[in-house]
């Protein structure tokens, strides 16, 4: 649940028709606050509210924050922030594409903000990227406001599809070298939790992977306490479907937590840190800011407590036994002072 609170009668910007609302003399008293757990909230100061609105599927806001720059908030949950989104997107994209020997065709489930496509398109072997997001208004919004991804949206290798990712994958006959789940977190009442289930992985995702193909998904909070919400059961669910499954994590400052990803394939992941670095040097345009071989080795070496939880996890994610992170869909509130 995300709230914007401003003292002295300042509204959250909804009344200015999506235009930027400068806070001027009230800057010290305007904050974004997100309830992470029942008794834990995370807040940071705002310079201004750049846009708020609602689509058919989600509530959306773009905030100019003091500590993290521009921040995208969907359904009351921070999705990405300007200063540290590179950690999330490099971690989501590059391990899978580097472990694949020749990734040419990529399918992104979600990814509407364009950052995942941006990182994929840095790979020299990539010939075609399908980005399938259900919410056209969010995609158009991100095209307009997130300048850092404009080049990716204009790349001729990118094919943008507005559709439900499950329906799109089921209706397509072609297979892909890498499929990436850049979906919203599984939130009760949200649109995405069915795309974390065993049946979806087994009967929709896996048949659309080429021989040697790799699937990777964001997997929610992975901190010492928060990993039991969904990270451990997403990992265990993928273990029921694929032979080789690698969980890994990284701290995202704007999320106020460690975040998790899970990579899966029926082909083993055999590259060491030096081999990953060599592939990065030859296959990726430009330098990563966060991820290199040693960083991935560290990211995939989980703490003792988290390893034990994952090893002992028995829950399999199904539509009838879904787990959710704290919060619920359409939770963004417009608080007028």
Image (spheres, rainbow, N blue to C red):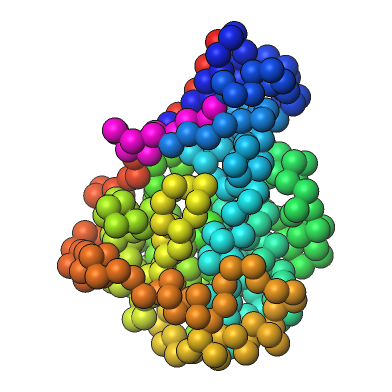
Depth order, front residue of 256/318: 256
Count of number-bearing discs: 0
The majority secondary structure of the magenta stretch comes to: strand
Coordinates of residue 209 in the picture (x, y in percent): 51, 75
Depth order, front residue of 139/27: 27
Q: Quadrant of residue 308?
A: bottom left
Q: Quadrant of residue 264?
A: bottom left
Q: Residue at x 81, y 65 (%)?
A: 156
Instruction: Give the vertical position of 249 relative to 166 (above or below).
Output: below
Depth order, front residue of 152/7: 7
In the rendered structure, does residue 104 fall within the stretch colored magenta?
no
Q: Residue at x 53, y 65 (%)?
A: 92
Q: Is residue 261 left or right of residue 11?
A: left
Q: Which residues are magenta?
A: 31-41
**Residue 99 in view of the camera:** no
**Residue 331 in view of the camera:** yes
Q: Is residue 43 left or right of residue 12?
A: left
Instruction: Give the vertical position of 89 relative to 288 (above or below).
Output: above
Q: Quadrant of residue 259?
A: bottom left
Coordinates of residue 309 in the picture (x, y in percent): 22, 64
């Amino acid at each position: 649940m995300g709230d914007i609170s401003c003292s002295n009668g300042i509204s959250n910007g909804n009344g200015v028709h999506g235009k930027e609302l400068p806070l001027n003399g009230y800057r010290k008293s305007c904050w974004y606050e997100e309830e992470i757990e029942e008794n834990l909230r995370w807040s940071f100061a705002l310079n201004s509210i750049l846009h708020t609105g609602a689509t058919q599927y989600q509530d959306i806001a773009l905030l100019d924050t003091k500590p993290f720059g521009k921040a995208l908030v969907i359904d009351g949950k921070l999705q990405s922030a300007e200063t540290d989104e590179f950690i999330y997107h490099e971690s989501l994209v590059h391990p899978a594409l580097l472990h694949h020997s020749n990734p040419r065709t990529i399918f992104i489930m979600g990814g509407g903000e364009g950052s995942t496509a941006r990182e994929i398109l840095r790979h020299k072997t990539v010939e075609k990227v399908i980005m399938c997001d259900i919410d056209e208004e969010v995609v158009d919004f991100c095209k307009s406001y997130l300048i850092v991804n404009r080049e990716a949206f204009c790349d001729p290798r990118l094919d943008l599809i507005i559709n439900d990712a499950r329906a799109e994958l089921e209706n397509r006959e072609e297979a892909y070298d890498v499929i990436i789940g850049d979906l919203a977190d599984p939130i009760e009442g949200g649109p995405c939790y069915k795309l974390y289930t065993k049946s979806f992985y087994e009967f929709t995702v896996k048949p659309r992977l080429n021989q040697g193909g790799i699937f990777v998904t964001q997997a929610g909070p992975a901190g010492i306490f928060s990993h039991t919400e969904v990270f451990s059961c997403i990992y265990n669910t993928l273990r029921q479907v694929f032979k080789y499954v690698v969980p890994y994590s990284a701290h995202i400052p704007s999320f106020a937590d460690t975040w998790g990803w899970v990579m899966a394939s029926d082909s083993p992941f055999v590259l060491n840190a030096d081999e990953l670095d060599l592939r990065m040097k030859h296959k990726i345009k430009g330098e990563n800011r966060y991820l290199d071989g040693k960083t991935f080795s560290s990211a995939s070496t989980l703490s003792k407590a988290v390893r034990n939880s994952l090893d002992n996890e028995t829950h399999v994610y199904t539509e009838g036994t879904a787990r959710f992170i704290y919060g619920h869909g359409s939770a963004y509130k417009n608080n007028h002072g």
